[in-house]
Image (cartoon, rainbow, N blue to C red):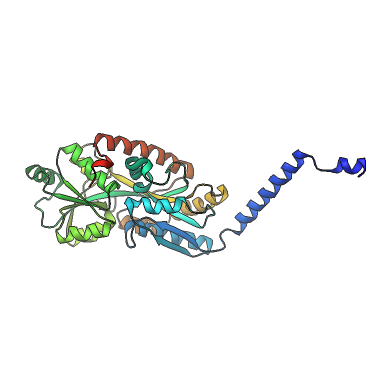
Amino acid sequence: MTYASVLSLPTKPSLIALSLLCLSTMARMAFAAYPDKPIRIIVPYPAGSAPDFTAREVGQLYTKALSQPIVIDTRPGAAATLGHAIAAKSNPDGYTLLLATTGGMVSGPALLGHKIPYDASKDFAPIGLATYVPYGLAVTSGLPALSIKELITLAKTVPGKLNVASPGVGTPNHLGAAQLMTMTGIELTHVPYKGGSLALNDLIAGNVQILVTALMQLIPLHQTGRVRILGIGHQSRLKAYPDIPTIAETVPGYYNTGWWGIVAPAGLEPAIVRKLNTIMQEGLVNPEVVKRFEKNGLEVTRSTAPAMQALITSDLQLWKKLIKEAKISVDVLP
């Protein structure tokens, strides 16, 4: 080998630069081809639930913009943490997304801590919020309570005799009921179910007297008199349903509003995060889309990925504080 040829050999820094260039080129090529196959959205609640509706609405936005089918994969169980755990362990290639919920991202982790197999703060790449979820408190039609005030009065006369259902232990629904008990001094018996639909069926049948759940499932039953919505956990009355009072009108300071949004497993290429976020941001201002959400008792919202991450962090602190104040421990849950 000649001296000139030795000088022409790449040095270590140039090899590193070449490697970085190759990786950058490969990333750009992968992004340019994305998506080239169907995308799965995991929903941690049963088919037909309000989260399922939200995922399908967002899925339609992605299908239209990306020209790829969206497959909805419902994985209910464990207070929404089962579906979140599956998503957290998935490949961060943009082909598995998750409809992240307050239950799986903040209230469940705040209550269960290390008992769930993922870290909500580290194992996901937030993409963007889709909706706020005002939870409604409904009673079976035969219960002699026409308002939150009357319900509180009734509950105090029969402590522990009224059952309050929820879609599962540690869900925002369950903790919303616990918050009401803590703030008013009433005693209700919590009955957890594996999903909101089962709990709702028992509310209609009168097997349980109270249910805290998303408004979407309650509104048509409320309108036909099969159940009675007494209040919502939002800060203000909803534009679409101004006749339904907030619980805070009777119990000042009460607040129980969740949110749903799209996340991916941690490590997703930032360019794909931005692409998916842009589609959501643009699609969720469509008046027809907004109207469909509002009709189902949901409030459309939008956010950047960093803003969603900040919300997860702040809500984790909020739920931990609520759980401590309500003296809820996983050791004493039913």
The quadrant of the rendering that contains the N terminus is top right
| Number of marks drawn | 0
- Write down the quadrant of residue 236 in the picture: top left
Q: Position of residue 105 (x, y in %)?
A: 38, 45
Q: Nearer the viewer, residue 202 or 133?
A: 202
For residue 120, above or below residue 35: above
Residue at position x 26%, y 52% in the image: 213
* In the image: residue 331, left or right of residue 93: left
Residue at position x 27%, y 56% in the image: 196
Q: Position of residue 191 (x, y in %)?
A: 20, 51
Q: Residue furthest right?
A: 2
Residue 320 visible in the picture: yes
Q: Nearer the viewer, residue 126 or 13?
A: 13
For residue 49, above or below residue 182: below
* In the image: residue 218, left or right of residue 57: left
Q: Nearer the viewer, residue 128 or 84?
A: 84
Q: Position of residue 186 (x, y in %)?
A: 14, 41
Residue 300 visible in the picture: no
